[in-house]
Image (cartoon, rainbow, N blue to C red):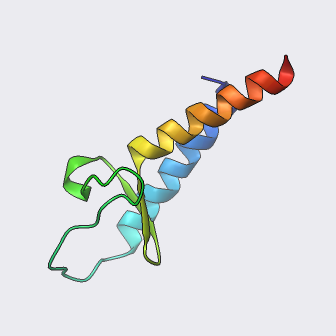
Amino acid sequence: MNPQAMQEAMTLMEKAKKYDELIAFPERDCELRCSFCGKGQSEVDKMVTAKNICICNECIGVCVEIITEDEKEETK
């Protein structure tokens, strides 16, 4: 993985961790689910949320891989 992409992913995960510590989610009848893969928050390490959209750390990792591959192809 590209070092810059890895650093960007790590920065995003750190921001997610800070938000987890700052935002207390109200009690919910159901757990949050990733809008991309459908996994519940209890099945992943982190869940980044905004309004009605959620993305888990695993899908973020896939996104980083896709972007890295695209950048490699562009530099060829």
| Residue 41 found in image quarter | bottom left
Residue 76 appears left or right of 28: right
Residue 47 appears left or right of 67: left
Question: Exactly how many numbered labels are in the figure?
Answer: 0
**Residue for point 47% across, 78% down:** 51
Q: Quick check: 25 above or below 5?
A: below
Q: Position of residue 31 (x, y in %)?
A: 21, 68
Outermost residue on the left side: it is 29
Q: Position of residue 74 (x, y in %)?
A: 83, 26
Outermost residue on the top side: it is 76
**Residue for point 63% across, 42% down:** 8
Q: Position of residue 49 (x, y in %)?
A: 43, 67
Q: Quick check: 63 above or below 74?
A: below
Q: Quick check: 26 above or below 46?
A: below
In this view of the protein, which residue sits in the foreground, 56 or 25? Answer: 56
| Residue 6 found in image quarter | top right
In this view of the protein, which residue sits in the foreground, 59 or 46? Answer: 59
**Residue for point 21% across, 48% down:** 43
**Residue for point 85% across, 16% down:** 76
For the N terminus, give its image quadrant. top right
Q: Quick check: 14 above or below 25?
A: above
